[in-house]
Image (tube, rainbow, N blue to C red):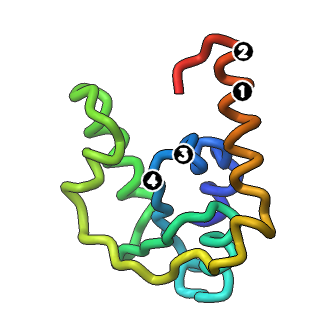
Amino acid sequence: GLNGYFTSDPIAAFSSGKESKVLATGGASVNLDILQVLSDVFNSPVYTIKTSDSACLGSAFRAKQGPTGKAFRDVIKTGPEPKLVVRPSPESEKAYCVSRFQMLEHSIMHSCDMPE
């Protein structure tokens, strides 16, 4: 759900300048105020899917991904169709310094010779 997303790997959500999307699941995903904050912080549109047990669905996607070696974004395309619920507010990038964060992340990745 949303809790796991915020705590699992929030840095990856910025995706270093690539178009990113947030897929919000779990109980809090019905709260549009929370989803708007999520969209603004990550400067990405937020989608939800209609499913009763998102933790099991996420685990199934990961299990399906393992032997195929496919990108996770390609694996989840086989699941329920996500619905766009919110887009970032126009002022969110400035408020959350997204461009600066992306620049710093890019600099760190290159200084450590890490793939992006």
Q: Which residue is mark 3?
A: 17
Q: Which residue is mark 2?
A: 111
- Mark number for residue 54? none
Along the line of sight, the residue nearer the viewer: 26 or 115: 115
Q: Which residue is mark 1?
A: 107
Q: Residue at x 78, y 58 (%)?
A: 97
Assess whether mark 1 and mark 2 are in contact (beta carbons under 8 angstroms): yes
- Report the amino acid beneath label 2: Ser
Assess whether mark 4 and mark 3 are in contact (beta carbons under 8 angstroms): no
Mark 2: secondary structure = helix
- Report the amino acid beneath label 1: Ser
Along the line of sight, the residue nearer the viewer: 87 or 75: 87
Asked where in the image residue 93 lies, by quadrant, the reply is bottom right
Q: In 3D space, how far apart are the residues under numbered discs 2 and 1 (Cα atoms)? A: 6 Å
Q: Which residue is mark 4?
A: 19
**20 left or right, relative to 34:** left
Q: In 3D space, how far apart are the residues under numbered discs 2 and 3 (Cα atoms)? A: 17 Å
Local packing at callout 3 (Cα closer than 10 Å; few below 14, some 14-19, many 20+) is few
Assess whether mark 3 and mark 2 are in contact (beta carbons under 8 angstroms): no
Residue 100: % across, % down: 76, 47
Q: Residue at x 57, y 41 (%)?
A: 16
Asked where in the image residue 37 lies, by quadrant, the reply is bottom right
- Report the amino acid beneath label 3: Gly
Q: In 3D space, how far apart are the residues under numbered discs 4 and 1 (Cα atoms)? A: 19 Å
Q: Quadrant of the N terminus?
A: bottom right
Q: Residue at x 34, y 47 (%)?
A: 73
Asked where in the image residue 38 lies, by quadrant, the reply is bottom right
Q: In 3D space, how far apart are the residues under numbered discs 1 and 3 (Cα atoms)? A: 13 Å
